[in-house]
Image (cartoon, helix red, strand yellow):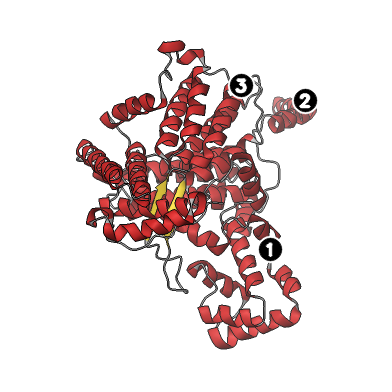
Amino acid sequence: MNSKIKSLLILLATFIVIAIALSFIQGRMNAIRFNEKLTDTDPLENAPPAVAFTSVALGGFRGLVADYLWLRSTKMQEQGNYFEMVQLADWLVKLQPRYTTSHAFLAWNMAYNISVTFTGFEDRWRWVKRGIELIRDEALEYNPGDPELFRQLGWIYQHKLGKDLDDANRFYKTEFAKEMIRLFGDYYGEWDLIEKAPANEAKLRAAIGDKDYAEMLKIAANKYSYASFAEIEEAFRHHAVIYPVEFKRDLEDIGIAKTVELCLRARWIILKYRLEPQWLTKLNEKYGALDWRLPEAHAIYWAERGKDKWSSERDNEHYFKRLSCDRMCFQSLQAAFETGRLVYVKNADPDNMYSDIKFLEMTPNVKLVDAANASFAQALEGYDEFTISGAYGNFLENAIVTLYLFGEKNKAVEYMKLGRTFPKYGVGANSRFAGSLDDFVLRSVERDLEAASYNDAQKTVQSYLINSYFKLAMEDHEQAEGYLDLAQKIYAKYAKFVEGTERRRGLPPWKQMLKTSLDMTKYMLRERVSPELADNLEKMLPKSGEKFIPEAGEIKTPQVR
């Protein structure tokens, strides 16, 4: 046997030995890869054909393609070519549908980094909204139960939309509120009806009967050029109502308009915005009257969905993620208490009543104070965190002042007594909550006005204006003018303080604040105090002088259910 053949046989024998050895350890290697989540082995849920094809066709090369797209995306951002980044982000999600960390980063990058490169508020909102949609509409489509995505989505609602760190923050809140007003329509708060509504076209047909369903499609095609149920649904989402109004009247004539609208609206709420009615009901029962047209309620929703899947045990790997969700809940509840009630007027045009909101403003929702307090207490019990106790002290102080200013003095005294039970906040005369209620509030207001936030200034001015109109209803002209004058002084002082940052922190125009406060007073008098006092206020206004009368007309203040 020559040396060449001998060498080949040795190589062959070596290869066989190695192959046999690998076969013994392959199973163990695969188990480690699966347990440590080093590879994607589970089938994707809800994967569209494009994603399924990409996953199979590219196989292991998906990572290389994704790396190239990440580099391309970075280059596009450096060059300011942001619109190509939208398509790149879409491809990256499809190439790596399970890589939720990248989805969260892409969304955060759009909502924070890219948005602030634009000066126009409409452009900024477009990018913030696109960041939300990337997680909600795409990432959650492939990972419907991922708590990390819930947490990241909640953070954008709480921080980017809820806080006042961006010059356009009030524009974001307004546009989001308009979007939610359109979404819920006249069925806001009717979560049971929405949950029981037909979930698809087949169930709608079963609910209204074959005859009425066929009649609906016949009317839609012959009179309004709708070729299918899908086109009816598309028009509904565009106009936020059954469009045109004549079509709705036709459906009312055959007795199916309400069922059809509930089906269309429920599908929009659940399929597009991923808001589960049973969760909305559950959180309202737990916390009280959350206003689902404001970002704080949505932050709470997604934080609760996230922490529902994470343990609060300290030795658990998700402990700190659960803690961040708890923080998001009590911080958002505090914000909802301070500015969690929506006041607005909708368009009178029945075809576009939700497309042009004439007036919109956020005010304190004092009914949430106990829920916010309970959330803090739960967090203090579950986490021995110094930062939580500090935040709780600030909450108690803000709650006392807000309750006092909005006429809930007994409740304010209750929270003062609660504050005195915590040694961390001082004992006896040295307590942070020592003294009478009036003295405590005066100290706080004076200190707040030296460096007031937008929310503090707004609720302070509103409270004095409401007291002014209340005194006017009681025909106490002297006190009414005193409260009004004080409100004007606070308004002017705050305006001077925020000079140069009005776009981000400036209060609404004075006449608008008069208008809001007048309507709030009328509502509170009629619903909570005395309808006769509300009528008397209407009679006193023409006699009170121009400074009490806003230029704009009546405001409709919806109840928050």
Q: Confirm whether residue 86 shows in the render.
A: no
What amino acid is found at the position of numbered circle 1 in the picture?
Answer: Ala
> Along the line of sight, which residue is nearer the eye, 239 or 28?
239
Secondary element at tag 3: helix
Secondary element at tag 1: loop
Q: Could you give the CA–CA distance between mark 2 and mark 1, rounded to whole angstroms?
A: 60 Å
Name the residue rendered at 47%, 46% in the picture.
295
Q: Residue tagged by mark 1?
A: 197
Q: In the figure, residue 314 lies in which quadrant?
A: top right
Q: Residue tagged by mark 3?
A: 381
Label 2: few (<14), some (14–19) or many (≥20) C-alpha neighbours in 10 Å:
few
> Along the line of sight, which residue is nearer the eye, 419 or 164?
419
Q: Could you give the CA–CA distance between mark 3 and mark 2, rounded to whole angstroms?
A: 55 Å
Left or right of 150? Residue 26 is right
Q: Position of residue 298 (x, y in %)?
A: 53, 45
The circle on residue 21 is: 2
What amino acid is found at the position of numbered circle 3 in the picture?
Answer: Glu
Name the residue rendered at 56%, 33% in the picture.
325
**Upstream in the sequence, badge 2 or badge 1?**
2
Q: Position of residue 469 (x, y in %)?
A: 35, 49
What amino acid is found at the position of numbered circle 2 in the picture?
Answer: Ala
